[in-house]
Amino acid sequence: MKKIVLGLVFLGLYACSQPTRETINADEALDYCAAQVDRTLHELSNGGSIDYTMMPRNIMDSLTVWHTRKTTKEEWTSGFWPGVLWYDYEYTKDQKIKGEAEKFTESLEYFAHIPAYDHDLGFLIFCSYGNGYRLTGKPEYKNVILAVADSLATLYNPVVGTILSWPREVEPRNWPHNTIMDNLINLEMLFWAAKNGGNKRLYDIAVSHADKSMKSLFRPDYTSYHVAVFDTITGNLIKGVTHQGYADNTMWARGQAWGIYGYTMCYRETGDPKYLDFVEKITDVYLKGLPEDYVPYWDFSAPGIPDAPRDASAAAIVASALLETSTYFEGKKSEEYWNAAVKMLESLSSPVYQCRESKPAFLLHSTGHWPGGSEIDASIIYADYYYIEALMRYKKLL
């Protein structure tokens, strides 16, 4: 039985609670994250000052130090490291961490002053400035979020009903209007802006995008494509394809994870039960195909299973989502989703998946872009972000 009355939540602050027994030592896991954050900050300082425009991105399997990237339009992950710092500050209350979070966050401020170039603005700004505003209430942070939300909305095509994800892929791939699964996560910034002083139209854009994506990015069995390609004249779907998955007819693990997280958030923000019904369907097909440790292979039809690479980032995203999803159900379904999230966190918190002494990241064994040969079996910053978010959510819901 579903709970139709929602708790008001923002980035993991829930009004409703989930009575459970504690099976993970959340403080121990968060202490581990705090220690790894300190190691990373020490590494980034390199014995001197920190360049706050250089963000940790990944540590490949054979390496032991972060590969950092400049906060440019081409780097979609730059908001995750500031977001990690904000969660770490929320847990530790360490003013030094707060100061570092502010400096890394504010290096992204220029996105409020440039035209939108693709959909990743939500990842960049809401993970950084969104968490920062939640914890500090700084009005200048709110102003940045509102400005970037307006910028993101310029990519919305009312004929299609979705936000254009990759303008750069329109001509090379002949994808006239493309919308990718990841784009669902950026809707949270639009919902938030519409409710916090921004243009009310942003809410309608987010709903339209969520509804059209529901119809276009999923197959009848509720598995997902990565990309939906639309005709800009009629707004009709041309085809669904993969980009980072194995094939056009397979379920890319992180893509399905974005869907589970995204539609849970859409239910929270709108209260529309159709989103919760849909979350149930796409979650159940995901859970049914998981290996015993609940950390998926990078694609559910990946070649070489059971020796194929895993994707810890997908597990972290789904764990964080299902902790929230479980609060919107009652009875066996609530317990099922809660227990699944706990199993994911138990595995991710084990020696198999935690970096521990080997690297300053949180997690091992994520897969970024297998078809592109990029970030395979690596530590990746967005896996760390959703892992610490999931731990914070778990701690608050106990």
Image: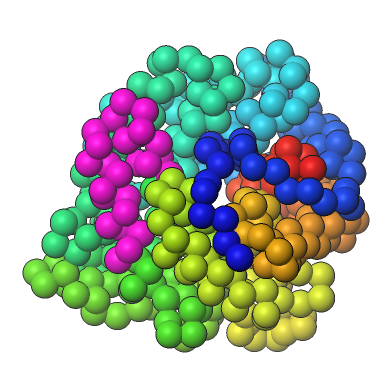
* Residue ID at (44%, 21%): 141
Residue occupying the point 24% across, 76% down: 237
- Give residue 24's position: percent from left, percent from top: 87, 49
- Quick one: 276 or 105, which is closer to the camera? 276
Q: Nearer the viewer, residue 66 or 336?
A: 336
Using the rendered view, name the quadrant where residue 211 is placed. bottom left
Residue 313 place in picture, x, y as percent: 65, 57
> Is 201 in the magenta?
yes
Location of residue 188 in the rendering, given as x and y in whole percent from the top left corner: 43, 44
Asked which quadrant contains residue 101, the reply is top right
390 lies left or right of 354: left
Where 279 sits versus 59, above or below? below
Magenta stretch, main secondary structure, is helix
Q: Is residue 290 above or below residue 398?
A: below
Q: Which residues are magenta?
A: 188-212
Q: What residue appears at the point 81 percent right and 37 percent down from the top-left corner?
A: 30
> Is residue 381 depicted above or below 92 in this figure?
below
